[in-house]
Amino acid sequence: MSGIAVTLGGTAVSHTSKSQRVVALSTTEAEYIAAGEGVKEALFVRAVLSFVAPETSWASIQVREDNQGAMTLVQNPLSSARSKHIDVRFHFIRELFKSGRISVEYVSTDEQHADLLTKALCRVKLEYHRKALMNLPE
């Protein structure tokens, strides 16, 4: 299950929660695939925004990831024994990182607001993530 939230100015402008189309063999692979899906959605949002406000077309997309293994896969173009089986179609995110069109930032699991879309959370965490995605005061 992938949860994707695209934010602009701190407010969610697009979100989705859906099953992944492929079977991931590890949590790292699942997070890497989800990051790629999130980047595709963010690229679409940026394309729409640049149509309305062309000066925004240069902005880098910031990927917030809570899995350090997935971050390593994005940042390192070399394949290892653990990652060589990942389908090449998911590696486009590496090219975007290399070209500077996206950046990757580590966030702790407690700060990963997209978890709201995929996990059963207690009321306190649910409210925290909801307020963060809707840019509401705490």
Image (cartoon, helix red, strand yellow):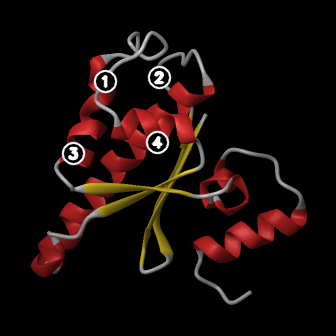
State the image quarter where residue 25 is shown: top right
Which residue is depicted at the point 56% across and 29% down?
28
Camera-side mark, 1 or 4: 1
Q: Residues within 10 Å of mark 2 (few under 14, many from 20)?
A: few
Q: Which mark is residue 78?
A: 1
Q: Are the residues tagged 1 and 4 within 8 Å (C-beta)?
A: no
Callout 2: SS: loop
Q: CA distance from mark 3 to mark 2?
A: 26 Å
Q: Which mark is residue 21?
A: 2
User: Residue 89: horizontal and vertical position, in percent?
Assistant: 28, 23
Query: Could you tell me if residue 34 is visible in this image?
Result: no
The residue lying toward the viewer, choosing from 64 and 130, is: 64
Q: Is residue 24 left or right of residue 57?
A: right
Callout 4: SS: helix
Q: Are the residues tagged 3 and 2 within 8 Å (C-beta)?
A: no
Q: CA distance from mark 2 to mark 1?
A: 24 Å
Which residue is depicted at the point 22% across and 70% down?
59
Q: Which mark is residue 98?
A: 3
Callout 1: SS: loop
Q: Which mark is residue 71?
A: 4
Q: Which tag, 1 or 4, sits closer to the chain's start?
A: 4
Determine whether 120 is above or below 23 in the image. Answer: below
Q: Are the residues tagged 3 and 4 within 8 Å (C-beta)?
A: no
Q: CA distance from mark 4 to mark 2?
A: 21 Å
Q: Amino acid at mark 3?
A: Lys
Q: Which tag, 4 or 2, sits closer to the chain's start?
A: 2
Camera-side mark, 4 or 2: 4
Q: CA distance from mark 1 to mark 3?
A: 13 Å
Callout 3: SS: helix
Q: Which mark is residue 16?
A: none
